Amino acid sequence: MSILVDERTKVLVQGLGREGAFHAAQCIAYGTKIVGAVKPGKGGTTQDGIPLFDSVVQARQEVNPRATVIFVPASGAADAILEAADAGIALVVCITEGIPTLDMVRVHEYLKGTRTRLIGPNCPGIISPGKCKIGIMPGHIHTPGSVGVVSRSGTLTYEAVGQLSALGIGQSTCIGIGGDPIIGTSFRDAIELFNADPKTDAVVMIGEIGGTAEEEAAAYIQEHVLKPVIGFIAGQTAPPGRRMGHAGAIISGGKGTAAEKMAAMRSAGITVVESPAEIGGAVAERLAHGAEVKPDAIWTSGM
Amino acid sequence: MKIHEFQAKQILKGFGVAVPGGSVADSADGARAIAGQMGREVVVKAQIHAGGRGKAGGVKIAKTPDEASAVAAGILGKKLVTIQTGPEGQLVRRVLVEETLPIERELYLGIVLDRASAAPVFMASEAGGVEIEKVAEETPELILRETIRPGFGLQPFQARKLAFGLGLPAASIQQAAQFMTALYRAFESADASLVEINPFVLTKDARLLALDAKMNFDDNALYRHEDIRKLRDLDEEEPLEVEASKYSLNYIKLDGTVGCMVNGAGLAMGTMDIIKYAGGSPANFLDVGGGASAEQVRHAFEILLSDKNVRAVLINIFGGIMRCDIVATGVVEAARTLGVKVPVVVRLEGTNVEQGQQILKESGLNFTVANGMKDAAEKVVALAK
């Protein structure tokens, strides 16, 4: 199975410039049902065989997409998210990197009380292998299976997925939650969905320095998750106070270090590997030993 | 992006935040002239992007214009070493010559993003003039916090709450609340990532001013703040990092011996980690981003190799959309053009990986092909010894 997106999901593209058009074509080639794209002023025409619409609302009325993927440049991306939410789109995947932080603070507030789930921004997207690819990840390294992957990174996720596929371990859904400090879907949110998916048997979480999202996820996992969880935290060697590429990857005021995250995750029973090359192997080992029984968790999670 | 204290004060003044009177000088004579104009005791403050200037001798009182000149001469053109600059220190090119104030109380105000609540938080503390991080760790109850509701800004009632919480005299509450709301307006309008007033001062004659001001800005928002972007001081930044940013390369210099070139920030951090895990020391973080063209790779090599500590280089590229044979061709071309002599370990993954590896092996250059990150890390660490 999979979470959030599958072979039936209809997808709208917001932003069909050079990047957007290239990746839309790649998604279509993968089998994703792209039903249109928004280009204000070009509604009624087509580009590369994709029907164009003037607005998300117009597209919603005519082709009823369940999800949109945003490639709009940073200066207009927050507005694109709001437009999609206002039109009632259930899933918005924002690939765009470089959105001002205070724009995302406002987006985050706006989305409260709407039916929209945002993934990203600054993320590679979401893929349910064999069914639906929404984003820029290389489809061919993924194989369908039962391990859920959630990550703040792009290429580091592909590294983990590559290791899993090479070991014959397929993936149910891989979600890139993005590298920014304010994002729409957290580790905890994604893991809650994986936990409820009967066809996801284990979860891989790939975190990095900055913020407390991994610690929050660990607390949730401790209380509610019996499935094996394997983790890696990038940035164990990162110096404090420096932004390591991702806007959200910064150790600030002594907080957000890899060591703290790894400790919190281990306390919650997550298998945390120190080397990124060991992710696949650790998953294989946990799967071989089956789901562990956590006596306390059975009593507290209402089972 | 960081700016100097005097620039932060200028910006804040524009938003109605009270700051002491003063001007900037880049010479001892200039300092004398300003002190002469002000006709009173002044404080001469080194302008560098790091904190801890006072303890390091970079902030000194001068009672006369001649003294101001002597003090400035002792600071300008010299390296100031503070707890935040590192042992090399930072060259001081300018000083701020400012009126001294009759200080009654030193407090702390700060605004920063609280990721957990996805909103800015306005902090205030009676523990002003000291390291706020120490206060946060040892006596967190001394820090008052008000979370900003996005779209509303800092409400006057929140500012009054903080002002009363700081134990300010009744007669100063209104003024303090106005100061704080103006400070938040500056933070939001300028797309700051941090604003810190430490110390926020109540004078003996009941004035409230920002004795020091620090403002950091969200790099992602600079495109819409041309005036702030112009304040960037390249002299305060690491030269190799400035060079890298010209080519949209994300580079951070560290102090190890293994140079790394990777596509993607997470994978780049993971590569640094695995080098350490294999017993080596990363010389840098370098994310070449999505476009590892021959030109980009050449710029990346040039920057990596400018660091004389680098004894070996690891290139780790996970080509998703990017084909490995194209990457390999680019790497070979770049290395040949530059005459790269240090050993280079290349680990490629993704589309056309075998073709890519073949191109590297047949190049006749000092390339070692690795399979997987573990193999790559072990090989490069051995070569860097």
Image (spheres, rainbow, N blue to C red):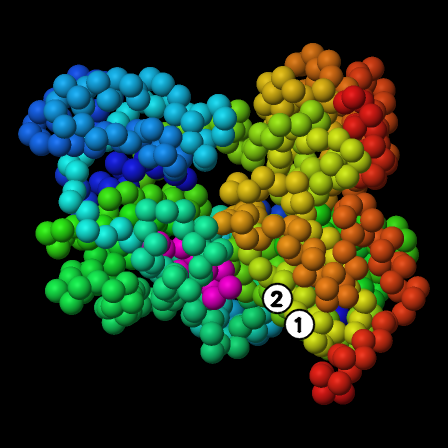
Query: What number is the disc on residue A216?
Result: 2
- Asked if the residue under mark 2 is in contact with the one under mark 1, i.e. CB atoms within 8 Å, the reply is yes
Q: Is residue B358 above or below residue A30?
A: above
Residue B158 sits in quarter: bottom left
Q: Residues within 10 Å of mark 2 (few under 14, many from 20)?
A: some
Query: What number is the disc on residue A205?
Result: none
Q: Find the distance from the CA under tag 1 to the CA under tag 2.
A: 6 Å
- Say which element carries label 1: helix
Residue B28 sits in quarter: top left
Chain letter of disc 2 in the image: A
Extreme residue toward the right, this view: A288
Q: How many marks?
A: 2
Q: In the image shown, does A125 or B384 lie closer to the viewer?
A: B384
Residue B40, position as x, y percentages in the image: 9, 32
Lateral position of residue B254 relative to residue B339, left or right = left
Residue at position x 69%, y 57% in the image = A263
Residue B146, position as x, y percentages in the image: 36, 66
Using the rendered image of the protein, determine whether residue A7 is visible from the camera's viewpoint: no
Using the rendered image of the protein, determine whether residue B306 is visible from the camera's viewpoint: yes
Query: What number is the disc on residue A220?
Result: 1
Mark 1: amino acid? Tyr
* Magenta segment: B108-120
- Say which element carries label 2: helix
Q: Residues within 10 Å of mark 1 (few under 14, many from 20)?
A: some
- Please state, as top left, top right, bottom left or bottom right, where the N terminus of chain B lies in the image: top left
